[in-house]
Amino acid sequence: MGEPTQSNTDPQPGSGQLDRRGLLFILSSPSGAGKTTLSQMLLKRDSEIKLSVSVTTRPPRPGEVDGVHYHFVSDEKFDAMVAEDDFYEWAHVFDHRYGTPKGLIRTGLKDGQDFLFDIDWQGTQQLYQKDQQDVVSVFILPPSLDELRRRLEARAQDSNDVIDSRMDRARAEISHWAEYDYVVINDDVDQCFERVCEVLDAERMRRTRQTGLIPFVRELMGG
Ligand code: 5GP
């Protein structure tokens, strides 16, 4: 998770840079609807948000790097982390377990660091229960189920059986769309990305997140 990027310095009237609390930005979608592409675009565009790297018991896919895409661990290690209360949330997805390590998230939020989560509806609900005020959730819908299947097949990483089970899972995942703060249809990835960025930019400006506003206004009004 790395170091927080912002320090709590005194606000400078007119500088436009006020201290703010970070947020937990969740992008969810069925596999293949584009959230991983969108996450990568967001991390490239925006240096104030960093990926929360999950822990998983599933084996790496070709090209996946331990510590970058996931922390890949054994079942025994995952059990030990659950016992130690090392997770913010965790869930069974398909035949494996996935969890969000607590790490630096709590201190990072105070220092204005945003965290991006590429997690499913179960993880979203758990994060909401733990920390509703900091969560902003976005659900990405595919334009159609035919298109979703086409995208899964084009990835050519999984067998037909796996694709069938991911399509079943996609229907189940989509049924949770109404539990999210925002829903965006990924018909055109660039347009979808613009919508996602607009949501993030606006949520950062929420009054309740702008912790620097009180001292700023006090100084603005002459102490
Ligand atoms: P994949 O194996 O395709 O990388 O991910 C499978 C599913 O697990 C995805 O829907 C992804 O959002 C979900 N997932 C990944 N990390 C986490 C996590 O830390 N917690 C939860 N609850 N789900 C996760």
Image (cartoon, grey):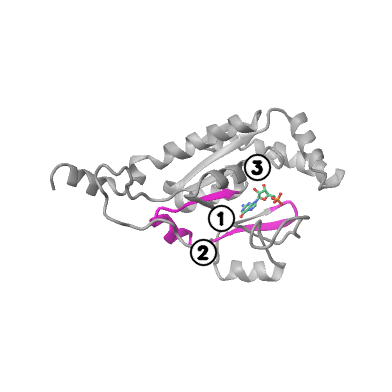
**Position of residue 131 measured from the top left corner of the image (x, y, whole percent):** 45, 51
Q: Position of residue 97 (x, y in %)?
A: 68, 58
| Ligand 1 within 8 Å, label 1 CB | yes
Amino acid type of the residue that numbered disc 1 sits on in the rendered structure: Ser
Image point (71%, 62%), residue name: 57
The N terminus - image quarter: bottom right
Residue type of the residue flagged with mark 2: Gly
Please report the bounds of the magenta region as a residue range.
93-118
Pick the residue in front: 202 or 159: 202
Is 170 magenta? The answer is no
Query: In front: 49, or 184?
Result: 49
Disc 1 crowd rating (10 Å Cα; few below 14, some 14-19, many 20+) is many
Residue 63, quarter of picture? bottom right
> SS at mark 2?
loop
Label 1: state its secondary structure.
loop
Q: Residue at x 52, y 41 (%)?
A: 137
Q: Is residue 33 left or right of residue 136?
A: right
**78 above or below 153?**
below
* Residue in the image at 72% along x and 28% along y: 144
Q: On the image, numbered disc 3 is attached to which residue?
A: 37
Q: Kindly check if marks 1 and 3 are in contact, taking CB atoms under 8 A apart as contact.
A: no
Task: Give the labeled residue for mark 2.
Answer: 103
Q: Amino acid at mark 3?
A: Thr
User: What residue is disc 1 on?
Assistant: 52
Q: Secondary structure at mark 3?
A: helix
Return the x and y of residue 98 as percentages of the image width and height: 65, 57
